Amino acid sequence: MQASFETILAWTMKAEGGLSKDPDDAGNWSSGVCGQGTLIGTNCGISAPVLIAFLAPVAITAEDMAAIAAPTVRSIYQVLYWLPISGASLPAGVDLMVADMAFNAGAAASARILQHVLGVKQDGWIGPATLAALGISKPAALLEQADANAVHGLQQALGIKTDGVIGPQTQKAIAAHPAQIALLVITALNARQSAYYRSLPDYREFGAGWLNRVNARQMAAYGLAIPVA
């Protein structure tokens, strides 16, 4: 789905921002380890090691990172993240949740989170079994994985009282929605992706930004899953 890819790429690029040369961020170093190698920086969320590997054997400098071209960014996103997570085969909204998480945490990690939500083998590859599971997901099983924060976002998207509790009104609104499975997968992914970030060693330093990114990702995903009237 070309339109979906372009929309999601644009969303991720806006969330990532521009050039950074933070010496305390391992992704800015050519080696992927703080203080080792060359401080090349990141741009559009593309880390130094990723750009070096993608353009090998061309030698990459800080100037190359600062001047990274849009077609290069697009190719990296498509080849390393969109295609590995089978983005074109995912439901609207779910594609954004999985693709943006892949760009932020790696395609395999994002795929395993989706597989955890769907209750299938967590092999880090979104293939026929994972895609089939999307079509037979049970609403109750997905709701069980949602925390209050994720439910609050779902209620906001549905235009109902936002109390973070799955009560009769929320259940009725979900059941009546034509995209209910996609909405619930998005909601469950918010909770699981947030839990993933909390498990990382750098959570204390970067956690607030990561969780804000998940919540923004969730609401943008609902915007894709819910057709405009």
Image (cartoon, helix red, strand yellow):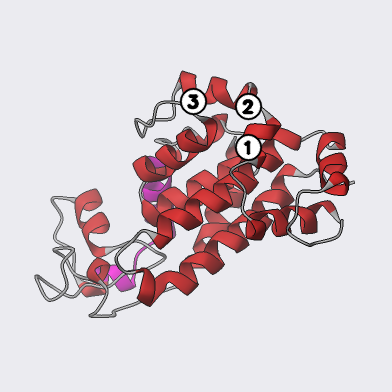
Residue at image mark 3: 130
Q: Position of residue 149 (x, y in %)?
A: 64, 60
Q: Position of residue 171 (x, y in %)?
A: 82, 41
Q: Amino acid at mark 3?
A: Thr
Residue at image mark 2: 137
Whether tag 3 and tag 1 are in contact, CB under 8 A, the answer is no
Label 3 to label 1, Cα distance in Å?
A: 15 Å
Pick the quarter of the image with the N terminus. Answer: top right
Which residue: 26% across, 55% down? 50
Q: Position of residue 17 (x, y in %)?
A: 47, 71
Mark 1 burial class by Cα count in 10 Å: few <14, some 14-19, many 20+: many
Most common SS among magenta residues: helix
**The residue tagged with tag 2: helix, strand or loop?**
loop
Res 17 visible: no
Magenta span includes 74: yes
Residue at image mark 1: 142
Which one is in front, 112 or 145? 145
Q: Amino acid at mark 1?
A: Leu
Mark 2 burial class by Cα count in 10 Å: few <14, some 14-19, many 20+: some
Most distant residue in the left direction: 37
Q: Considering only order in the chain, which callout, 1 or 3, is on the residue closer to the N terminus?
A: 3
**Quadrant hosting residue 10:** bottom right
Q: Considering only order in the chain, which callout, 3 or 2, is on the residue closer to the N terminus?
A: 3
Q: Position of residue 136 (x, y in %)?
A: 63, 21
Which one is in front, 229 or 18? 229
Label at residue 190: none
